[in-house]
Image (tube, rainbow, N blue to C red):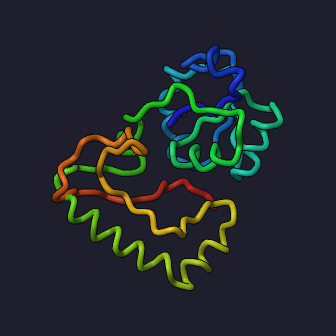
Amino acid sequence: IGFIVPDGAASRFPANAVGQTVGLLEGWAATSYFEMYRTVYSPQKVLQYGLQTSLWGALTAGTVDAVFIDNTTAKTWLTTNTGYRMVHATTHWANGISYGCHPEYGDVVAALNMGLMALKVTQEYRLLCAQYPSIACEFDGAMFSNTKTSLQPEVADHPSTRADIVLGTEGTYAP
């Protein structure tokens, strides 16, 4: 989780966003975190958007100075939008907002991965994704490995067996 800013602003963008206009996505866990820590973040103005396309459009148009968003969404957007980067990223952000994870139950993560892979090849999954075009659906069979790698350096060093993980969604999410 962190701020996506134009490359030219990256070195001078303040960690507390003071004096900046920040864009948020309505109903997302990152937004809940940002709002919960308003004593840390002090932007001049906050604009919330209901659609990712509107949020990213505001950033590229210069309507907002930065977007505060989760790593996965940021990485997806940054792969097709050069000239921007994430600054002031933090890996301890969740604090129970969207999920809880205890590393001692890796086999549970493996079982969830298998179930998710089985779901993602169904027509029902494709129809569900088609109903919500503003949400990026994943079809390539990616799985969470619970392992630190060069591509996922933010993942803690967890044991490879048993992981207790609770998956959930934000109660305020409005598709």
Residue found 52% across the figure and 48% down from its top: 72
Q: Could you tell whether 135 is left or right of 121 in the image?
A: right
Q: Nearer the viewer, residue 119 or 139?
A: 139
Quadrant of the rendered image containing residue 90: top left
Q: Is residue 25 visible?
A: no
Residue 73: x percent and y percent?
Answer: 57, 48
- The reply to whether residue 144 is in sight is yes
As displayed, is residue 113 above or below residue 53? below
Is 147 placed left or right of 45 in the picture?
left
Outermost residue, front direction? 150
* Image spot of residue 153 (x, y percent): 38, 39
Residue farthest to the right, as pictured: 61
Residue placed most toward the observer, 154 or 166: 154
In terms of image quadrants, where is residue 109? bottom left
Measuring from the top left, give residue 19's x and y in whole percent.
Answer: 68, 15
Please tell me which residue is depicted at 49% across the width and 30% down the height of the picture.
89
Report whether 117 appears left or right of 18. Answer: left
Residue drawn at x 49%, y 75% is 120
